[in-house]
Amino acid sequence: MVTRRELLQQGTVLMALPAMAAHGKSIDPARRKLDLLFLGGTGFMGPHQVEYALARGHRVTLFNRGRSAPSSFANRAEILLGDRDKTVGAGLSALQGSRRWDVVLDNSGYVPRHVSDSLELLKNRTGRYLYVSTVAVYDFSRGPYFTETSPLAAAPQPDTEQVTGKTYGPLKAECDRRVQAVLGQRATIVRPTYIFGPGDDTDRFTYWVDRVARGGTILAPPYPAHEIQWIDVQDLCPWIIDLAERGQAGIYNVAGPAKPTNWQQMLQPLTKLSSTPVQFKWATQEILKQTGISLPLVRDGLMGSGQTPHFDSAAALRAGLRLRPLMDTANATLAWWRAQTAKRRAQADGWPTPELEQQALKLLA
C-alpha cells in the first residue's frame, strides 16, 4: 500500500524541479568527478541534491526502496533497490561487496540500528560519510542558544524505533553520535532547521505562502515576536554537494536567515504575494485550543520557558553556505505549489480549513 508520504514524494520527484538550476544560474562542472552514493534520494532534499550532483558531472548511485517515482532518474543515475532495515526483504544486500564510493550521503537515517548497519557495511568503502541530521538533536532543556558543541538529547530506549514527534529528535541524536563515533574525521554532520522551498512534502511553509497569497484576514501565530529560523532547500542541497566535493569534515548547524527574524518579520514581506489586502490577526493559545487549530511551523516556547531556541550557523557560513532572500524562497515555493495537481494540493497536510480559520477569527473579534 502506498502511503501518503510516498504519494507526495512521487509528485515531488516527478516535478524534479527541472534540473534544479540550483540558483537560477548555469552550473559549472566539478573539477573532479566523484562516485556518490545516496541513501535515499527521492524525498524532499534528495532530488535537489541529486540534480545538482548530476549537473556537476558526478556519478550517482541511489539506494532506496524504489517506491517514490523509481524511474525519475532513469538513465542518469544507478538505482540499487533495498531497505535500510536489513530484516526487511532484500535489506542491504545490494550494497554488499567490495565496491567503493568517494562519498556516502545519508539522507534517510532515522533509526540508530539502521544507521549502524549501514556504517558497518560501508565504513571501509568510502572516503567520507555525510549524515544529514537535524537541529532537533539538541537537549532543549539546555537552551535557548545552541552551537554544534551543545549537548545532544539522551538516547531513547534501545527498542524505540518508531519515529514520532516525541522520538524524532532523540533517535536522530543517537544516529548522529554513532556516525561520529565510527568515522571520526571522515564524518560530516549537517544539522538543518526547518527546510523551506519547492518540493516540500511537509506542506508547512507552503501553507503560509499559499494562505497569504490568497489575501484577506489571516489567523497568525500567537507569538509574533518569537524567532523563526529556516533554510531554503535550494541553498542547503547544493552546499551539501559542495561539502562532499571538498571532503569537508565537521558538524554544521544550518539555520538562517543571517539576522534573527521573528514571525511578524517573516510574514509581513509575504504580503507582496497577494493582489488583495492582507491583515494578520494574532491568535491566542486559548483560541487555538478551543478550535483545535494547529498552525504549521508554530511551536510553544522552549521547555515552557517562553523562549524559542536559536541555532548558531556561523560555522556553516564560514564553510560557504549562502542564504537567499526570503521572497526568492516564497516566490519559488508558490510557483511550485501552483504547478501541482489539484489532487496533490487537496492533500495538503495539517492546514486549518477556511471554516476553522473563520471560527477562530470570530472568536478573536
Image: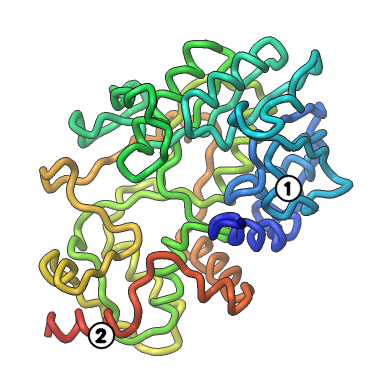
Residue 144 is situated, as x and y percent measured from the top left of the image, at 21, 36
Disc 2: which residue: 358
Against 346, is 165 above or below? above
Q: In screen coordinates, is 311 left or right of 77?
A: left
Going by the image, does 56 lie left or right of 348? right
Quadrant in the rendering for residue 117: top right
Examine the image and state in which quarter residue 288 appears. bottom left
Q: Which one is in front in this view, the residue at disc 1 or the one at disc 2?
A: 2
Answer left or right for 274 relative to 126: left
Dot label at residue 116: none
Give the answer, above or below, for where 165 lies relative to 342.
above
The amino acid type of the residue labelled 2 equals: Gln
Point out the image quarter for the N terminus.
Answer: bottom right
Count of labels in the image: 2
Tell me the element at label 1: helix
Please tell me which residue is depicted at 19% across the width and 58% down the height of the picture: 225
Q: CA distance from mark 1 to mark 2?
A: 41 Å
The structure residue drawn at horizontal position 49% and vertical position 32%, both measured from the top left corner, is 190
- Sequence-earlier tag: 1 or 2: 1
Q: Is residue 141 above or below residue 324?
A: above
User: Where does the image place residue 145, in percent across and percent down from the top left?
Assistant: 24, 34
As drawn, 314 above or below 47: above
Residue that appears at 66% across and 16% down: 121
Residue 26 in the image: state x and y as whole percent: 76, 52
Q: Which mark is residue 51?
A: 1
